[in-house]
Image: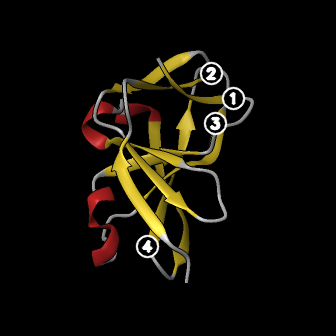
């Protein structure tokens, strides 16, 4: 079983896709789960949900629960399953309920500003 820590991410964070800002927040959470790099979770209220489409994809994590996925729809492309959320996270990680995380890559940027 991996060790998970959740803390308030310092400063202000932004997520962009296809050149558009999807969200900006000073209320991000940083989830650290060894051996993976830390993941920034954005409050759903600070994300432009109109750019996200729920997909049928889901994954199961023994520590966090079931993750639901979203595709990001930009003007030029659809980034399949590029964001995820735990709608009903396990008790140890309840803080990430109503938060979204994003797969950073060539088309999705998550950064501190």
Which of discs 1 and 4 lies nearer the camera? The answer is 4
Mark 3 / mark 4, whichever is N-terminal: 4
Q: How far is mark 1 from mark 4, CA to CA?
A: 26 Å
Residue pictured at 66% horizontal, 64% vertical: 35
**Residue 83 at what x, y percent from top left?**
52, 47
In the picture, measured across the screen, residue 17 lies left or right of residue 10, that is right
Q: Residues within 10 Å of mark 3 (few under 14, many from 20)?
A: some
Numbered circle sitting on residue 78? 3
Q: Residues within 10 Å of mark 1 (few under 14, many from 20)?
A: some
Which of discs 2 and 3 lies nearer the camera? The answer is 2
Residue pictured at 46% horizontal, 63% vertical: 68
In the picture, measured across the screen, residue 31 lies left or right of residue 33, that is left
Numbered circle sitting on residue 18? 2
Residue pictured at 62% horizontal, 21% vertical: 18
Mark 3 / mark 1, whichever is N-terminal: 3
Is label 3 in contact with label 4 (beta carbons under 8 Å)? no
Q: How far is mark 2 from mark 3, CA to CA?
A: 9 Å
**Residue 34 at what x, y percent from top left?**
60, 65
**Residue 108 at what x, y percent from top left?**
63, 31
Is label 2 in contact with label 4 (beta carbons under 8 Å)? no
Q: Secondary structure at mark 1?
A: loop
Residue at which label 4 appears:
64
Q: Is residue 5 above or below residue 46?
A: below
Q: How far is mark 3 from mark 4, CA to CA?
A: 27 Å
Residue pictured at 52% horizontal, 17% vertical: 20
Is label 1 in contact with label 2 (beta carbons under 8 Å)? yes
Q: Nearer the viewer, residue 76 or 64?
A: 64
Q: Secondary structure at mark 4?
A: loop
Residue at which label 1 appears:
107
Mark 2 / mark 3, whichever is N-terminal: 2
Q: Quadrant of residue 27?
A: top left
């Amino acid at each position: 079983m991996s060790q998970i820590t959740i803390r308030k991410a310092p400063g202000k964070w932004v997520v962009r896709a296809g050149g558009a800002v999807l969200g900006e927040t000073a209320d991000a959470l940083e989830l650290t789960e060894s051996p993976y790099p830390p993941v920034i979770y954005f409050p759903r209220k600070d994300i432009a949900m109109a750019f996200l489409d729920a997909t049928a994809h889901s994954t199961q994590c023994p520590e966090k629960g079931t993750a639901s996925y979203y595709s990001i729809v930009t003007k030029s492309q659809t980034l399949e399953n590029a964001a995820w959320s735990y709608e009903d996270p396990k008790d140890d990680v309840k803080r990430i309920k109503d938060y979204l995380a994003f797969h950073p890559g060539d088309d999705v940027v998550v950064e501190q500003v």
